[in-house]
Image (cartoon, coloured by chain):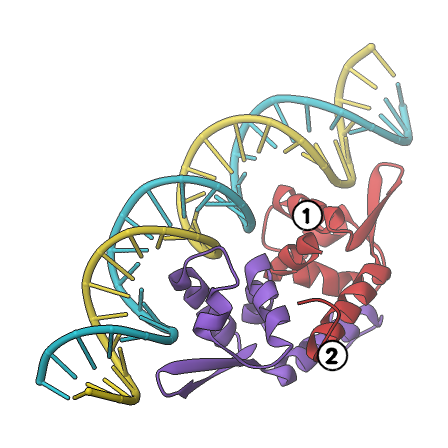
Chain colours: A red, B purple, C cyan, D yellow
Amino acid sequence: MNDVFRALADPTRREIVRLLRNGPRTSGEIAERFPSTWATISRHLSVLRDAGLILAERDGQRIRYELNTTVFQDLVDHLMDWIKPGGRRA
Amino acid sequence: MNDVFRALADPTRREIVRLLRNGPRTSGEIAERFPSTWATISRHLSVLRDAGLILAERDGQRIRYELNTTVFQDLVDHLMDWIKPGGRRA
DNA sequence: TCGACACTTAGCAAAGAATCTAATTAATGG
DNA sequence: CCATTAATTAGATTCTTTGCTAAGTGTCGA
């Protein structure tokens, strides 16, 4: 879960997530929307992927990324838990 | 909103948030639960405060911190938005 | 008003993260 | 098998974050 929070701490990565709401996109399609280098975006994608927030699927020469909504769901559940007092731990 | 995500990226700060679920605590009460220095915890508290995630209220010599649940609610709403496809922007 | 208590801020060193360029891997078409 | 396109990885640099010690602020009681 730590990876998830750390991944979302970066504004560019959150922007990538927002972009992927509208459906899967290739690495190149994502990269061309940002001022940063393709290499930099690729790095961001790997951070998001390692956190489980996005899924990668190769399609020929391209790699298609899409949101992993179940992890977002887990995150939302996690946060909901926090704002309910008297939770299991602590 | 960027501050909120950045604040939650640190595990110690998330732990503080979890602790505050069970009700307000003073700076000292919070600090004594962590291996870090009081000064370090104080710094974490200021990050959480700047992000609006917690509220500080002075009570004599003590300062009492409590969760600001409305900001968490906003965060949850924000995330829910992400996992619904076809949002307003992009 | 002095001193002790509760807490925060400042300043610094060390660890981590973001981004760039250049090199590398992988798939495809000729 | 070579060139091309698509994308990632490596290495270097710079910026940010973290956590420490030490100094400062604010409050209270004697």
Residue drawn at point x = 79 percent, y = 70 percent: A77
Please give the chain letter of the residue carrying mark 1: A
**Residue A69 occupies which quadrant of the picture?**
bottom right
Packing grade of label 2 (10 A; few <14, some 14-19, many >=20) is few
Question: Is residue A67 or residue C24 the one in the foreground?
Answer: A67
Packing grade of label 1 (10 A; few <14, some 14-19, many >=20) is some
Q: Position of residue A42 (x, y in %)?
A: 68, 44
Measure how far apart labels 2 and 1 are at the Cα level. Answer: 24 Å
Query: Is residue D12 placed above or below B47 in the rendered structure?
Result: above
Question: Is residue D20 or residue B78 the one in the foreground?
Answer: D20
Query: Is residue A15 placed above or below B20 in the rendered structure?
Result: above
Q: Which residue is mark 2?
A: B77
Q: Are marks 2 and 1 on the same chain?
A: no
Q: Position of residue B54 (x, y in %)?
A: 54, 78
Query: Is residue A22 placed above or below D27 in the rendered structure?
Result: above
* Amino acid at circle 2: Asp
Q: Position of residue B19 (x, y in %)?
A: 60, 71
For the residues bearing labels 2 and 1, Cβ distance under 8 angstroms: no
- In which quadrant of the rendered image does the N terminus of chain A lie? bottom right
Q: Which residue is mark 1?
A: A47
**Residue A8 occupies which quadrant of the picture?**
bottom right
Left or right, B53 with reference to A73:
left
